[in-house]
Image (tube, grey):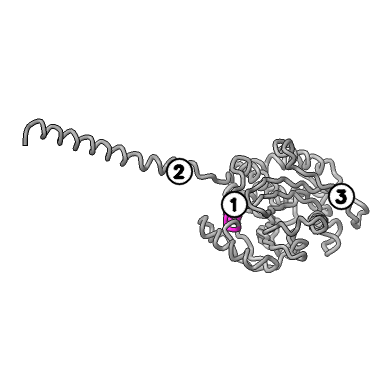
Amino acid sequence: MTNANSAVILNAAKTLRIWFLLLLFALPLTAAHSQKATPRFNGAAAYSLTQQYLDAAPKRWIGSPGHIKAEEFIKSHFTSEAAKGNFETDSFTASTPAGMLPMRNYIVRYPGKKDGVIVLASHYETNYPLRDINFVGANDGAATTALLIEIGNYLRVHPPEGYSIWLVFDDGEEAIQSWSDRDSLYGTRHLAAKWSANGTLSKIKAFLVADMIGDKDLNVDRDENSTPWLLDLLVIAAKNTGHSGSIFKNTVGVQDDHLPFKQRGVPVLDIIDLDYGPPTNEHPEGGFHHTELDTIDKVSPKSLQIAGDLFLEMIRLINQR
């Protein structure tokens, strides 16, 4: 072998080594870039929004100045959707034990690429019978309102690739006097009837409710009034996101905003944690529920992160069916 041939072979070997080293270093960089680019829900941002919402409208019972401020807060976060015609104010008047009361649902639409809709809903008002005490509903209404707003922030940057996603901020979930079939769920009863009449209901693939899931000690209940296949999907979602320890410690039958849609044949799932604070005789479901103790210190960014992860993974899994 000549010296010239040896030099050529050595140079080729050096070049191969250099390319191998470049590839070796590039792989972790590519993986890191891919990991960084993976979209995630922001639980800390949802917690901050909860505090902002409480600052703007701590008491939000229907007919109060705080209720109007709550509506203004929600609307202020969806001006870009409103500009595109994807924000709807659904106004109606409900017959209640306190007389005829004006109420409003807000619907934010994120168009997808598949024919069908996944609805995420939360009530935004506070309990009417508790209007004379310092009840702010940090977990019961505020945290899940903030959760939906932050999901909206996520969807604005990462539009749906599958079914359209609609966010529903519903009014009048709480009873005006005492809970009954007629005195509760005013907003979702109205919306289910309206969507049944205009044909929208047939487009809904799943109706998912967020309620009381900002609780620091979060464990989502297995709700017997939810659709079985969606409960099964929630188990998978929890496993996929690493949150299996945060669901199904308790099994309950919940009366909540999903019922008017369940009664009309829509697949429903209530993502709720009724076990809120140490139980008392008056509040066996938890001593913070419907009391002055339902404050921001009982809510955590970690719990909102878990809730957000579960909702986004549920959307992904429903799209795969």
Mark 1 lies on a secondary structure that is helix
In the image, what residue occupies the spot 62% across and 66% down? 229
Residue type (three-letter) at the residue carrying disc 1: Leu
Residue 92, image x and y in percent? 86, 50
Q: Quadrant of residue 47?
A: top right
Circle 3 is placed at which residue position?
Answer: 92
Residue type (three-letter) at the residue carrying disc 3: Phe
Asked if the stretch drawn in magenta spans residue 72, the answer is no
What label sits on residue 108 in the rendered view?
Answer: none
Residue 312, image x and y in percent? 59, 52
Q: Quadrant of residue 281?
A: bottom right
Residue 142, image x and y in percent? 71, 47
Q: Does 79 sit above or below residue 147? A: above
Q: Earlier in the sequence, mark 1 or mark 2?
A: 2
- Answer whether labels 2 and 3 touch (C-beta < 8 Å): no
Examine the residues drawn in magenta and state their main secondary structure. Answer: helix
Circle 1 is placed at which residue position?
Answer: 312
Circle 2 is placed at which residue position?
Answer: 34
Mark 3 lies on a secondary structure that is strand
User: Tag count in the figure?
Assistant: 3
The magenta stretch is: 307-318
Residue type (three-letter) at the residue carrying disc 2: Ser
